[in-house]
Image (cartoon, rainbow, N blue to C red):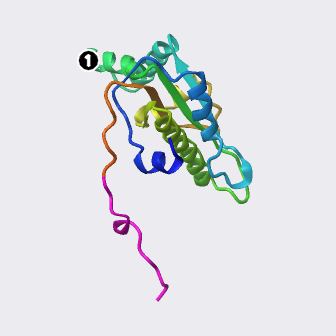
Amino acid sequence: MEALAALHNRVSVGLLTDPAPDASQREQIFRAALRAADHGNLRPWRFLVVEGEARNRLGELYRRASEAEAPLSEAQRERTLNMPLRAPLVIVAITCLQEHPKVPFNEQRMSTAGAVQAMLTAAFAEGVGAYWRTGALAENREVARGLGLAENEEISGFIYMGTPQKAPKAAPALAVEDFFRDWTGE
């Protein structure tokens, strides 16, 4: 797919099934992340690839972390355990915060977000369904510890990838002029 077509038409695809992206598709998707805007060339990101049985272990980690905060009903417990099973591949995006005199933490977080967006667009171009989720578990330090994150690292989100169960919806038609205005300083 042409680059501009992917950028203009990318949409999240929520209903995913097997197979996960193959090795060639992963290479393209992962390489795209490495081209994100990155002031100071800090490369403040890293990614964990979770698939197969590891998704069940991630679900258990989610359950333990959630139950440490409050008791779960049986339905909540089941839902929490099944979260990583929404797709055959889950990628955990991690921001590695580094002290730098010219690159504040927020800019490093935005760089990781740029890497995630690049992966989502590359996935779309490759015909892979994908979506990005955050939520309470992304901010849970027990989940972070269970994934082996250092104290200076934080989860920027969970990216789900797989084969779309149905054709992606068309991107909504948005008018550029609704979002861009000239500023003259007067």
**Which residue sits at x=58%, y=36%?**
94
Residue 2 falls left or right of residue 178: right
The amino acid sitting under disc 1 is Ala
Circle 1 residues within 10 Å: few <14, some 14–19, many ≥20: few
Who's the residue at 45% across and 19% down the image?
A: 88
Circle 1 residue: 75
Q: Position of residue 33 (x, y in %)?
A: 60, 40
* Image vertical order of residue 36 relative to residue 27, above or below: below
Q: Is residue 182 magenta?
A: yes
Q: Residue lying at the far bottom in this picture: please name it.
A: 186
Instruction: Indicate the secondary structure of the residue bearing disc 1.
Output: helix
Q: Quadrant of residue 148?
A: top right
Between 163 and 117, the one lying in front of the other is: 163
Q: In the current view of this chain or complex, which residue is farthest to the top? A: 53
Q: What segment carries the magenta color?
A: 173-186
**Place of residue 1 in the rendered image (x, y in percent of width and height, measured from the top left):** 50, 41
